[in-house]
Amino acid sequence: MPKRWRCFHCDQTFNTKGTAAVHFGKLSNATPLCTLSERYHHLGIYIRKLESELSDYKNEGGDILRAMYAQQHETETMLREAEEQGFMRGIEQTRDMLQTLNDMLDRLNQGLGKCQGLSLFVSSVCVTCGM
């Protein structure tokens, strides 16, 4: 048997949770619509809509909040990727510099092999032969 809600003020029965929520309200301290006078009934419907929006806001279920969180996540992801790319560029540049230094040392060592004198270096130049 499907669940039903019955109002003890007006004895009206509701078959769906949605229609019951409109009549009773989603909050525990809400006033049932049937207790409002007939001329304020439209205000009761509007109040239910506001209660629903407030509930969504409190539960962070609003469309604006979801969009905001999605944008924040996207921005953080883009920043992290940019930082990682910069880090990798720095590593590549360091590798290139080390390779250049190794090449210079190899050339220097080849030049020292030709030198017959004492290998004392001042600013990467052999004091004996000037290489």
Image (cartoon, helix red, strand yellow):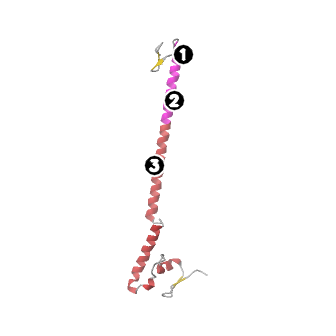
Task: Classify residue 4 by image quadrant.
Answer: bottom right
Label 3 vs label 1: CA separation? Answer: 51 Å
| Residue 100 in picture, x, y percent from top left | 49, 28
Magenta residues (range): 92-115
Q: Depth check: 118 or 68 in front?
A: 118
Q: Is the magenta stretch mostly helix, strand or loop?
A: helix
Label 2 vs label 1: CA separation? Answer: 21 Å
Element type where label 2 sits in the image: helix
Q: In the image, is residue 42 part of the stretch drawn in magenta?
A: no
Element type where label 3 sits in the image: helix
Q: Which mark is residue 113?
A: 1
| Residue 36 in picture, x, y percent from top left | 41, 84
93 on left or right of 3: left
Verify CB contact (< 8 Å) between mark 3 and mark 1: no
Give the residue number, with chain letter if any, for mark 3. 79
Give the residue number, with chain letter if any, for mark 2. 99
Q: Residue 33 carries which label?
A: none
